[in-house]
Amino acid sequence: MTKRNSGYTNTRASNGAFASTTNSSTYVQVLTLPAGTYQIFAGGGEGNGGDGKTCNFKVGDDVVFTFTLTKSAWSQSGNSEAFTIYEPKVLYVACDGASASGLDWLYVKGTPANTLGNVACTTDYLNAMTDRVELTPGSSCSYKFINFNKGNGGNWQNWVLPVYYSNDNRVIVLRADNWEDVKGNNSGCNNNYDWNVFVDQMNGAVVDMTVTYSAENALTISSNITTANGTAWTYSYNSSDAGVSLSGNIKVALSVSQSWLAMYNEAVVPVTSAGWATLYTTQALDFSSVTGLEAYTATVSEGTVTLTKVDNVPANTGVVLKAAEGSYVIPTIASSETDKGNLIGSTTATSAPAETGYTYYGLTVADNDNVQFNPITSGTIAAGKAFLKVATGESGVKSFNVVINGMETGIASLPTAKVTSNAVYNLAGQRVSTPQRGIYIRDGRKMVIK
Protein backbone atom coordinates (compact mmCIF):
# COMPACT_ATOMS: atom_id res chain seq x y z
CA MET A 1 0.00 0.00 0.00
CA THR A 2 3.03 2.29 0.46
CA LYS A 3 6.04 2.89 -1.73
CA ARG A 4 9.44 2.41 -0.22
CA ASN A 5 11.94 5.27 0.16
CA SER A 6 14.42 3.59 2.51
CA GLY A 7 14.45 1.37 5.56
CA TYR A 8 11.52 -0.08 7.41
CA THR A 9 10.14 -0.45 10.93
CA ASN A 10 8.71 -3.40 12.82
CA THR A 11 5.19 -2.17 12.23
CA ARG A 12 5.49 -0.74 8.73
CA ALA A 13 6.17 -2.21 5.32
CA SER A 14 8.17 0.93 4.57
CA ASN A 15 8.53 4.50 5.73
CA GLY A 16 7.68 5.84 2.31
CA ALA A 17 4.78 7.81 0.93
CA PHE A 18 1.44 6.49 -0.28
CA ALA A 19 1.92 4.46 -3.43
CA SER A 20 -1.57 5.03 -4.83
CA THR A 21 -2.12 8.78 -5.06
CA THR A 22 -0.51 12.05 -4.06
CA ASN A 23 -3.57 13.80 -2.63
CA SER A 24 -6.83 12.87 -0.94
CA SER A 25 -9.00 13.81 -3.92
CA THR A 26 -7.25 11.81 -6.67
CA TYR A 27 -8.78 8.34 -6.56
CA VAL A 28 -7.53 4.99 -7.77
CA GLN A 29 -9.65 1.84 -8.09
CA VAL A 30 -9.23 -0.89 -5.47
CA LEU A 31 -11.92 -3.47 -6.29
CA THR A 32 -15.55 -3.87 -7.30
CA LEU A 33 -17.97 -4.74 -4.50
CA PRO A 34 -21.11 -6.74 -5.28
CA ALA A 35 -24.41 -5.65 -3.75
CA GLY A 36 -24.28 -6.18 0.01
CA THR A 37 -23.43 -4.71 3.42
CA TYR A 38 -19.78 -3.84 4.16
CA GLN A 39 -17.35 -2.22 6.57
CA ILE A 40 -13.86 -0.91 5.74
CA PHE A 41 -10.88 -1.37 8.09
CA ALA A 42 -7.54 0.35 7.42
CA GLY A 43 -4.16 0.78 9.10
CA GLY A 44 -1.09 2.93 8.52
CA GLY A 45 1.33 5.42 10.02
CA GLU A 46 2.32 9.09 9.97
CA GLY A 47 5.89 10.26 10.27
CA ASN A 48 7.03 13.88 10.31
CA GLY A 49 4.87 15.00 7.44
CA GLY A 50 2.43 16.79 9.70
CA ASP A 51 -0.83 15.95 11.44
CA GLY A 52 -4.09 15.26 9.66
CA LYS A 53 -2.99 13.34 6.59
CA THR A 54 -6.00 11.47 5.28
CA CYS A 55 -7.16 8.57 3.16
CA ASN A 56 -10.61 8.87 1.65
CA PHE A 57 -12.50 5.73 0.64
CA LYS A 58 -15.24 6.15 -1.91
CA VAL A 59 -17.81 3.59 -3.07
CA GLY A 60 -19.29 4.68 -6.36
CA ASP A 61 -19.72 8.43 -5.95
CA ASP A 62 -20.03 8.45 -2.16
CA VAL A 63 -17.21 8.85 0.37
CA VAL A 64 -17.94 6.20 3.02
CA PHE A 65 -14.82 6.51 5.21
CA THR A 66 -12.10 9.06 5.92
CA PHE A 67 -9.05 7.62 7.70
CA THR A 68 -7.04 10.40 9.37
CA LEU A 69 -3.45 9.78 10.51
CA THR A 70 -1.83 11.40 13.54
CA LYS A 71 1.75 12.74 13.40
CA SER A 72 4.53 10.48 14.69
CA ALA A 73 2.30 7.49 15.23
CA TRP A 74 3.54 4.58 13.17
CA SER A 75 0.84 2.06 13.90
CA GLN A 76 -2.70 3.39 13.60
CA SER A 77 -5.99 1.85 12.51
CA GLY A 78 -9.61 2.80 12.00
CA ASN A 79 -12.82 1.59 10.45
CA SER A 80 -15.93 2.87 8.73
CA GLU A 81 -19.52 2.47 9.78
CA ALA A 82 -21.38 -0.36 8.07
CA PHE A 83 -22.86 0.66 4.72
CA THR A 84 -25.13 -1.08 2.22
CA ILE A 85 -25.09 -0.98 -1.57
CA TYR A 86 -27.80 -2.51 -3.72
CA GLU A 87 -25.87 -2.90 -6.96
CA PRO A 88 -22.17 -3.57 -7.78
CA LYS A 89 -20.00 -0.51 -7.17
CA VAL A 90 -16.26 0.25 -7.33
CA LEU A 91 -14.28 0.96 -4.16
CA TYR A 92 -11.74 3.77 -4.65
CA VAL A 93 -9.05 5.19 -2.35
CA ALA A 94 -7.25 8.55 -2.38
CA CYS A 95 -4.52 9.50 0.10
CA ASP A 96 -2.38 12.51 1.00
CA GLY A 97 1.16 12.13 -0.30
CA ALA A 98 3.32 13.07 2.69
CA SER A 99 6.80 11.61 2.39
CA ALA A 100 6.56 9.61 5.59
CA SER A 101 2.88 8.68 5.54
CA GLY A 102 1.67 5.24 4.68
CA LEU A 103 -1.49 3.18 4.29
CA ASP A 104 -0.14 -0.23 5.24
CA TRP A 105 -3.21 -2.44 5.03
CA LEU A 106 -6.83 -2.47 3.98
CA TYR A 107 -9.54 -4.99 4.87
CA VAL A 108 -13.11 -4.99 3.57
CA LYS A 109 -15.50 -7.06 5.67
CA GLY A 110 -19.02 -7.74 4.53
CA THR A 111 -21.81 -9.94 3.34
CA PRO A 112 -22.87 -9.86 -0.32
CA ALA A 113 -26.58 -9.25 -0.75
CA ASN A 114 -28.99 -12.01 -1.57
CA THR A 115 -29.59 -11.58 -5.30
CA LEU A 116 -31.94 -13.29 -7.71
CA GLY A 117 -31.03 -13.55 -11.38
CA ASN A 118 -27.81 -12.73 -13.21
CA VAL A 119 -26.61 -9.12 -12.81
CA ALA A 120 -26.00 -9.05 -16.57
CA CYS A 121 -29.79 -9.40 -16.97
CA THR A 122 -29.45 -12.61 -18.99
CA THR A 123 -31.67 -14.82 -16.80
CA ASP A 124 -34.66 -15.85 -18.87
CA TYR A 125 -38.31 -15.71 -17.85
CA LEU A 126 -38.98 -17.78 -14.68
CA ASN A 127 -35.53 -19.45 -14.84
CA ALA A 128 -34.51 -18.15 -11.41
CA MET A 129 -36.90 -18.27 -8.47
CA THR A 130 -37.02 -17.95 -4.71
CA ASP A 131 -38.30 -20.83 -2.59
CA ARG A 132 -42.04 -21.20 -2.93
CA VAL A 133 -43.97 -19.93 0.08
CA GLU A 134 -47.03 -22.00 0.93
CA LEU A 135 -50.04 -19.92 1.95
CA THR A 136 -53.14 -21.23 3.67
CA PRO A 137 -56.40 -19.24 3.51
CA GLY A 138 -56.02 -16.38 5.97
CA SER A 139 -52.23 -16.01 5.63
CA SER A 140 -49.82 -13.69 3.82
CA CYS A 141 -46.16 -13.16 2.96
CA SER A 142 -44.05 -10.20 1.87
CA TYR A 143 -41.06 -9.36 -0.30
CA LYS A 144 -38.84 -6.28 -0.42
CA PHE A 145 -36.23 -5.89 -3.12
CA ILE A 146 -34.58 -3.57 -5.61
CA ASN A 147 -35.47 -4.29 -9.23
CA PHE A 148 -32.81 -3.99 -11.95
CA ASN A 149 -33.37 -4.33 -15.70
CA LYS A 150 -31.41 -3.89 -18.92
CA GLY A 151 -32.44 -0.27 -19.20
CA ASN A 152 -33.22 -0.74 -22.86
CA GLY A 153 -35.46 -3.81 -22.80
CA GLY A 154 -39.18 -4.35 -22.82
CA ASN A 155 -41.63 -3.48 -20.06
CA TRP A 156 -41.93 -7.16 -19.13
CA GLN A 157 -38.22 -7.53 -18.37
CA ASN A 158 -38.55 -6.85 -14.64
CA TRP A 159 -39.76 -8.84 -11.62
CA VAL A 160 -42.33 -11.62 -11.99
CA LEU A 161 -44.56 -13.24 -9.32
CA PRO A 162 -45.84 -16.76 -10.12
CA VAL A 163 -48.63 -18.35 -8.05
CA TYR A 164 -49.13 -22.13 -7.96
CA TYR A 165 -51.79 -24.59 -6.91
CA SER A 166 -50.67 -27.12 -4.30
CA ASN A 167 -49.94 -29.56 -7.15
CA ASP A 168 -47.36 -27.05 -8.50
CA ASN A 169 -49.41 -26.07 -11.57
CA ARG A 170 -49.20 -22.33 -12.24
CA VAL A 171 -52.48 -20.46 -11.87
CA ILE A 172 -51.24 -16.83 -11.93
CA VAL A 173 -48.05 -15.22 -13.28
CA LEU A 174 -48.14 -11.54 -12.42
CA ARG A 175 -45.65 -9.35 -14.29
CA ALA A 176 -44.38 -5.97 -13.13
CA ASP A 177 -45.86 -4.25 -16.18
CA ASN A 178 -49.55 -4.57 -15.33
CA TRP A 179 -50.03 -7.97 -16.98
CA GLU A 180 -51.04 -11.49 -15.92
CA ASP A 181 -49.50 -14.13 -18.16
CA VAL A 182 -51.72 -17.18 -17.58
CA LYS A 183 -54.92 -15.48 -18.74
CA GLY A 184 -52.95 -13.23 -21.08
CA ASN A 185 -54.60 -9.97 -20.03
CA ASN A 186 -54.50 -7.33 -17.30
CA SER A 187 -57.77 -8.22 -15.55
CA GLY A 188 -57.44 -7.54 -11.83
CA CYS A 189 -54.32 -5.35 -12.28
CA ASN A 190 -54.26 -1.70 -11.17
CA ASN A 191 -51.41 0.85 -11.17
CA ASN A 192 -50.50 4.51 -11.40
CA TYR A 193 -47.43 4.05 -13.61
CA ASP A 194 -45.97 6.67 -15.92
CA TRP A 195 -45.51 4.47 -18.99
CA ASN A 196 -43.28 7.01 -20.74
CA VAL A 197 -40.47 6.36 -18.23
CA PHE A 198 -41.47 2.92 -16.93
CA VAL A 199 -38.36 0.95 -18.01
CA ASP A 200 -35.89 3.61 -16.89
CA GLN A 201 -37.57 4.24 -13.55
CA MET A 202 -37.99 0.54 -12.71
CA ASN A 203 -34.23 0.11 -13.11
CA GLY A 204 -33.19 0.58 -9.48
CA ALA A 205 -36.72 0.87 -8.10
CA VAL A 206 -37.41 -0.33 -4.55
CA VAL A 207 -40.43 -2.66 -4.41
CA ASP A 208 -42.21 -3.44 -1.13
CA MET A 209 -44.78 -6.16 -1.84
CA THR A 210 -47.38 -7.98 0.26
CA VAL A 211 -49.21 -11.10 -0.95
CA THR A 212 -52.43 -11.79 1.01
CA TYR A 213 -54.50 -14.97 0.65
CA SER A 214 -57.36 -13.80 2.85
CA ALA A 215 -59.72 -16.63 1.88
CA GLU A 216 -60.31 -19.09 -0.90
CA ASN A 217 -60.84 -17.24 -4.20
CA ALA A 218 -59.47 -14.06 -2.59
CA LEU A 219 -55.80 -13.34 -3.37
CA THR A 220 -54.52 -9.77 -3.41
CA ILE A 221 -51.06 -8.47 -4.21
CA SER A 222 -50.14 -4.94 -3.18
CA SER A 223 -46.85 -3.21 -4.09
CA ASN A 224 -45.49 0.17 -3.05
CA ILE A 225 -42.75 1.16 -5.48
CA THR A 226 -40.20 3.95 -5.07
CA THR A 227 -38.76 4.57 -8.52
CA ALA A 228 -35.16 5.45 -9.37
CA ASN A 229 -35.94 9.18 -9.26
CA GLY A 230 -37.89 8.93 -5.98
CA THR A 231 -41.40 8.90 -7.41
CA ALA A 232 -43.96 6.78 -5.54
CA TRP A 233 -45.95 4.28 -7.61
CA THR A 234 -48.49 1.66 -6.58
CA TYR A 235 -49.40 -1.62 -8.24
CA SER A 236 -52.03 -4.12 -7.12
CA TYR A 237 -53.77 -7.28 -8.24
CA ASN A 238 -57.05 -8.87 -7.14
CA SER A 239 -57.83 -12.46 -8.16
CA SER A 240 -61.59 -11.95 -7.64
CA ASP A 241 -61.63 -9.06 -10.13
CA ALA A 242 -59.67 -11.25 -12.55
CA GLY A 243 -62.13 -14.13 -12.19
CA VAL A 244 -59.47 -16.59 -10.96
CA SER A 245 -60.66 -19.45 -8.75
CA LEU A 246 -58.42 -20.51 -5.86
CA SER A 247 -59.02 -23.19 -3.26
CA GLY A 248 -57.01 -24.97 -0.60
CA ASN A 249 -53.37 -24.04 -0.08
CA ILE A 250 -51.42 -22.14 -2.73
CA LYS A 251 -47.73 -21.36 -3.27
CA VAL A 252 -46.08 -18.11 -4.34
CA ALA A 253 -42.54 -17.22 -5.37
CA LEU A 254 -40.56 -14.31 -6.76
CA SER A 255 -38.84 -14.55 -10.13
CA VAL A 256 -37.26 -12.48 -12.91
CA SER A 257 -37.39 -12.04 -16.68
CA GLN A 258 -34.03 -10.87 -18.09
CA SER A 259 -33.62 -8.80 -14.95
CA TRP A 260 -32.19 -9.26 -11.46
CA LEU A 261 -33.24 -8.42 -7.92
CA ALA A 262 -31.28 -7.37 -4.83
CA MET A 263 -33.30 -8.75 -1.93
CA TYR A 264 -33.48 -6.84 1.33
CA ASN A 265 -32.09 -9.05 4.10
CA GLU A 266 -33.94 -7.64 7.07
CA ALA A 267 -35.38 -10.61 8.94
CA VAL A 268 -35.11 -9.28 12.51
CA VAL A 269 -35.74 -11.85 15.25
CA PRO A 270 -35.95 -10.99 18.98
CA VAL A 271 -34.69 -13.38 21.67
CA THR A 272 -35.79 -12.84 25.29
CA SER A 273 -33.74 -13.21 28.47
CA ALA A 274 -34.73 -16.89 28.52
CA GLY A 275 -32.11 -17.36 25.79
CA TRP A 276 -34.39 -19.40 23.52
CA ALA A 277 -37.02 -18.53 20.90
CA THR A 278 -38.88 -20.03 17.97
CA LEU A 279 -39.34 -18.65 14.49
CA TYR A 280 -41.51 -19.60 11.54
CA THR A 281 -40.08 -18.07 8.39
CA THR A 282 -41.66 -17.69 4.96
CA GLN A 283 -38.24 -16.79 3.53
CA ALA A 284 -35.13 -18.94 3.21
CA LEU A 285 -32.63 -17.75 5.84
CA ASP A 286 -28.86 -18.02 6.35
CA PHE A 287 -27.77 -18.20 10.01
CA SER A 288 -24.08 -18.96 9.33
CA SER A 289 -22.89 -15.33 9.58
CA VAL A 290 -25.02 -14.31 12.57
CA THR A 291 -22.70 -14.00 15.56
CA GLY A 292 -23.93 -15.40 18.86
CA LEU A 293 -27.02 -17.16 17.50
CA GLU A 294 -27.62 -20.86 16.84
CA ALA A 295 -30.55 -22.26 14.87
CA TYR A 296 -32.04 -25.77 15.13
CA THR A 297 -34.68 -27.74 13.29
CA ALA A 298 -36.74 -30.18 15.35
CA THR A 299 -37.90 -33.72 14.62
CA VAL A 300 -40.19 -35.96 16.69
CA SER A 301 -39.56 -39.69 16.81
CA GLU A 302 -40.19 -42.43 19.35
CA GLY A 303 -40.87 -40.12 22.26
CA THR A 304 -37.92 -37.80 21.61
CA VAL A 305 -37.63 -34.31 20.15
CA THR A 306 -34.25 -33.96 18.45
CA LEU A 307 -32.85 -30.50 17.74
CA THR A 308 -30.36 -30.41 14.86
CA LYS A 309 -28.13 -27.36 14.38
CA VAL A 310 -28.41 -25.86 10.89
CA ASP A 311 -26.66 -23.07 8.98
CA ASN A 312 -29.62 -22.27 6.74
CA VAL A 313 -33.24 -23.24 6.16
CA PRO A 314 -35.70 -23.06 3.26
CA ALA A 315 -38.88 -21.00 3.23
CA ASN A 316 -41.87 -22.25 5.26
CA THR A 317 -39.69 -23.68 8.04
CA GLY A 318 -39.91 -23.54 11.83
CA VAL A 319 -36.71 -23.30 13.87
CA VAL A 320 -35.61 -23.09 17.49
CA LEU A 321 -33.12 -20.29 18.20
CA LYS A 322 -30.58 -20.07 21.04
CA ALA A 323 -28.87 -16.74 21.76
CA ALA A 324 -28.31 -14.06 24.37
CA GLU A 325 -31.13 -11.55 24.82
CA GLY A 326 -31.37 -9.13 21.91
CA SER A 327 -32.52 -8.70 18.31
CA TYR A 328 -30.72 -10.48 15.49
CA VAL A 329 -30.70 -9.59 11.79
CA ILE A 330 -30.71 -12.77 9.69
CA PRO A 331 -29.81 -12.60 5.99
CA THR A 332 -32.25 -14.04 3.49
CA ILE A 333 -31.13 -16.37 0.73
CA ALA A 334 -32.83 -17.52 -2.45
CA SER A 335 -33.21 -21.17 -1.41
CA SER A 336 -31.94 -23.94 0.86
CA GLU A 337 -31.79 -27.74 0.69
CA THR A 338 -31.88 -28.23 4.48
CA ASP A 339 -34.53 -30.65 5.76
CA LYS A 340 -37.36 -28.68 7.37
CA GLY A 341 -38.01 -31.01 10.31
CA ASN A 342 -41.38 -31.14 12.09
CA LEU A 343 -41.85 -27.60 13.41
CA ILE A 344 -44.67 -25.69 11.74
CA GLY A 345 -46.12 -22.20 12.05
CA SER A 346 -48.16 -19.51 10.37
CA THR A 347 -48.01 -15.86 9.35
CA THR A 348 -51.21 -15.31 11.32
CA ALA A 349 -52.16 -16.16 14.92
CA THR A 350 -53.14 -19.83 15.38
CA SER A 351 -55.81 -20.97 17.81
CA ALA A 352 -55.16 -23.80 20.23
CA PRO A 353 -55.91 -26.55 20.94
CA ALA A 354 -55.34 -28.27 17.62
CA GLU A 355 -57.98 -30.00 15.56
CA THR A 356 -59.29 -33.35 16.75
CA GLY A 357 -56.60 -36.01 16.80
CA TYR A 358 -53.66 -33.63 17.29
CA THR A 359 -51.89 -31.82 20.13
CA TYR A 360 -49.84 -28.64 19.76
CA TYR A 361 -46.60 -28.30 21.73
CA GLY A 362 -44.93 -24.93 22.38
CA LEU A 363 -41.39 -24.12 23.48
CA THR A 364 -40.68 -23.37 27.13
CA VAL A 365 -37.44 -23.24 29.09
CA ALA A 366 -37.36 -25.01 32.45
CA ASP A 367 -34.87 -24.68 35.29
CA ASN A 368 -31.20 -25.16 34.44
CA ASP A 369 -31.79 -24.21 30.80
CA ASN A 370 -33.76 -27.39 30.07
CA VAL A 371 -35.66 -26.97 26.82
CA GLN A 372 -39.24 -28.26 26.83
CA PHE A 373 -42.18 -28.49 24.45
CA ASN A 374 -45.32 -28.39 26.58
CA PRO A 375 -48.90 -28.96 25.39
CA ILE A 376 -50.77 -25.81 24.36
CA THR A 377 -54.33 -26.39 25.50
CA SER A 378 -55.88 -22.93 25.04
CA GLY A 379 -55.31 -19.43 23.69
CA THR A 380 -53.48 -18.53 20.50
CA ILE A 381 -49.99 -19.02 19.11
CA ALA A 382 -48.51 -15.75 17.88
CA ALA A 383 -47.86 -15.20 14.18
CA GLY A 384 -44.33 -16.09 13.15
CA LYS A 385 -43.80 -18.55 16.02
CA ALA A 386 -43.04 -22.23 15.48
CA PHE A 387 -44.61 -25.19 17.27
CA LEU A 388 -45.00 -28.95 17.04
CA LYS A 389 -48.21 -30.61 15.86
CA VAL A 390 -48.24 -34.22 17.04
CA ALA A 391 -50.89 -36.84 16.37
CA THR A 392 -52.63 -37.85 19.59
CA GLY A 393 -51.80 -41.50 19.04
CA GLU A 394 -48.14 -40.55 18.74
CA SER A 395 -48.05 -38.30 21.81
CA GLY A 396 -50.51 -39.97 24.20
CA VAL A 397 -49.26 -39.51 27.76
CA LYS A 398 -45.60 -39.71 26.79
CA SER A 399 -43.05 -37.12 27.83
CA PHE A 400 -40.71 -36.14 25.02
CA ASN A 401 -37.02 -35.93 25.90
CA VAL A 402 -35.25 -33.07 24.07
CA VAL A 403 -31.89 -33.96 22.56
CA ILE A 404 -29.46 -31.47 21.01
CA ASN A 405 -26.69 -32.99 18.95
CA GLY A 406 -26.90 -36.21 20.92
CA MET A 407 -26.97 -34.55 24.37
CA GLU A 408 -30.17 -34.80 26.43
CA THR A 409 -31.29 -31.40 27.71
CA GLY A 410 -34.37 -32.20 29.75
CA ILE A 411 -37.97 -33.30 29.65
CA ALA A 412 -39.58 -31.97 26.51
CA SER A 413 -43.25 -32.16 27.38
CA LEU A 414 -45.76 -32.91 30.04
CA PRO A 415 -48.46 -35.56 29.70
CA THR A 416 -51.42 -34.33 27.73
CA ALA A 417 -53.71 -35.07 30.69
CA LYS A 418 -54.07 -32.22 33.15
CA VAL A 419 -51.35 -32.31 35.80
CA THR A 420 -52.31 -31.39 39.34
CA SER A 421 -50.04 -30.62 42.25
CA ASN A 422 -50.51 -34.18 43.52
CA ALA A 423 -49.89 -35.94 40.19
CA VAL A 424 -46.40 -37.40 39.72
CA TYR A 425 -45.12 -39.02 36.50
CA ASN A 426 -42.03 -41.04 35.71
CA LEU A 427 -39.86 -40.40 32.65
CA ALA A 428 -42.03 -42.73 30.56
CA GLY A 429 -45.02 -40.46 31.20
CA GLN A 430 -46.73 -42.97 33.52
CA ARG A 431 -48.46 -41.72 36.62
CA VAL A 432 -46.83 -42.95 39.82
CA SER A 433 -48.77 -43.15 43.09
CA THR A 434 -45.81 -43.97 45.35
CA PRO A 435 -42.58 -42.65 43.81
CA GLN A 436 -39.32 -44.27 44.88
CA ARG A 437 -35.79 -42.99 44.38
CA GLY A 438 -35.31 -41.43 40.94
CA ILE A 439 -36.36 -38.57 38.66
CA TYR A 440 -40.03 -37.66 38.23
CA ILE A 441 -42.24 -34.87 36.84
CA ARG A 442 -44.67 -32.85 38.95
CA ASP A 443 -46.35 -29.57 37.98
CA GLY A 444 -44.26 -29.45 34.82
CA ARG A 445 -40.93 -29.63 36.64
CA LYS A 446 -38.42 -32.34 37.30
CA MET A 447 -38.15 -33.56 40.85
CA VAL A 448 -35.46 -35.84 42.24
CA ILE A 449 -36.15 -38.29 45.08
CA LYS A 450 -32.94 -39.52 46.72
Image (cartoon, grey):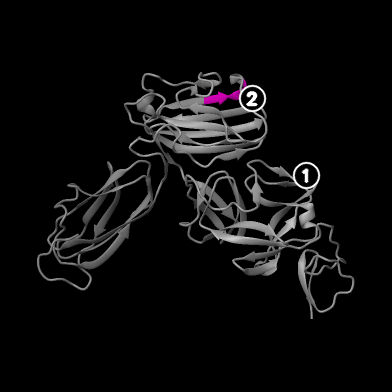
Q: Earlier in the sequence, mark 2 or mark 1?
A: 2
Magenta residues? Answer: 236-240
Disc 2 to disc 1: CB gap under 8 Å = no
In the displayed structure, 361 sits above or below 145; it is below
Q: Nearer the viewer, residue 186 or 325?
A: 186
Main SS of the magenta segment? strand
Q: For the residues carrying marks 2 and 1, which lies nearer the camera in this image?
A: 2
Q: Nearer the viewer, residue 267 or 218?
A: 218
Q: Nearer the viewer, residue 107 or 281?
A: 281
Name the residue rendered at 38%, 51% in the picture.
82
Name the residue rendered at 57%, 43% in the picture.
282
In the displayed structure, 195 sits above or below 128; it is above
Q: Is residue 209 magenta?
A: no
Q: Is residue 237 magenta?
A: yes
Residue 333 screen position, x and y as percent: 47, 47
> Farthest left residue?
5
Residue picked out by circle 2: 245
Location of the C terminus (image quadrant): bottom right
Q: Amino acid at mark 2?
A: Ser
- 352 sits left or right of 222 in the view: right
For mark 1, does the 10 Å Cα neighbourhood hold few (<14), some (14 to 19), or many (20 or more) residues?
Answer: few
Name the residue rendered at 68%, 51% in the picture.
387
